[in-house]
Image (tube, grey):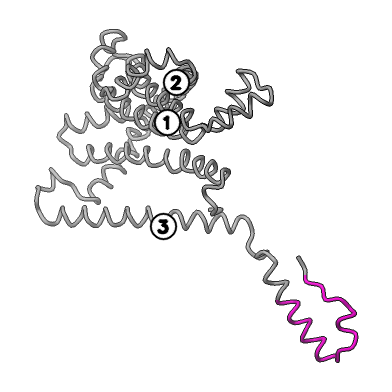
Amino acid sequence: MPTDVPTWFTSGLSTEDKDKIADVEAGLDALQTPDRGRSGAAAALSGALRRAWPPLLAVAVVLVVWQVVVWSGVQPIWNLPGPREVGTAISRAAQDGTLWEALGTSLSRGVLGFLAAVAIGTPLGIVVARVRWVRVAFGPIITGLQVLPSVAWVPAAIIWFGLSNGTVYFVVLMGAVPSIINGIVAGVDQVPPLLRSVGRVLGANRWSMVTEIVLPAALPGYLAGLKQGWAFSWRSLMAAEIIAVGGSIGFGLGQFLDQGRQLADMALVFTAILLILAVGIAVELLVFAPVERAVLRRRGLRPDAS
């Protein structure tokens, strides 16, 4: 907002005094005006760099510690390869296409399995959260399924579905769906009763109460459940791919890791481990973290614009 000095105030002043007042006015306007020289793209780039350098520094520290441990000779080089040997193995796997095949297979399975888990777990979670007898009857079972290691389902899935993609997707669903259900239940439990009362006073029906009041208010808890569901689905997928090998099940990162074990090629094993870790970090940084920041900023819980 510009600072305007009325003419009646400056009418009796000398030219020198008017210039001084004009300088002060210009300074105040500059303080009140946002930094117009900094474009939105530059601000976004600055924010991205500010968020990127701490993880990059952490990666550098890990690489240095890893190399120091290799140089210390606690294990022979064929049992504990260094960053350079693993980098060579990654380059070799990328050139012969093995890396891209394993990465594409596991990513497609992980994304499809997780989306299916969201489609199944979200309505089930709403029912469990809103219907008391369903919650009392099935809540403990769902919690038990959540803490059950998903690898325990692999032998049964192989018997039921054989060495096929059905085995992998079944294990992924059994790992992710209970976490999503419990996440949305926890989110609904944290919705203030006042919001429901306001909705009833305003005449909201059951559908409007769920879609326009309860779910938006439960969004932080639901988002936490989705993050946990993705973590469980990714772990379940790796467990299924490591154990279920052969048939029409394809070649994913789990099979890539197991191939390194069978060949006693530790550089290949480290390559698979790093790829599995990289996918988990990338999904967190590129998908869940921006959504979480947007939700918290919209609720006034994260005032920074970065």
Element under disc 2: helix
Residue drawn 60% across the image and 55% down it: 41
Residue furthest top as drawn: 160
| Distance between the alpha carbons at the discs numbered 1 and 2 | 10 Å
Identify which amino acid the numbered label 2 is placed on: Gly
Identify which amino acid the numbered label 3 is placed on: Trp
17 displayed left or right of 272:
right
Q: Residues within 10 Å of mark 3 (few under 14, many from 20)?
A: few
Q: Nearer the viewer, residue 177 or 46?
A: 177
19 displayed left or right of 34:
right
| Residue that carries the numbered disc 2 in the rendered image | 121
The circle on residue 53 is: 3
| Residue that carries the numbered disc 1 in the rendered image | 225
Q: Nearer the viewer, residue 155 or 184?
A: 184
Magenta segment boundaries in residue numbering: 3-27
Camera-side mark, 3 or 2: 2
Check whether the beta carbons of the residues at disc 1 and disc 2 lie within 8 A of each other: yes
Q: Nearer the viewer, residue 223 or 158?
A: 223
Residue drawn 24% across the image and 32% down it: 257
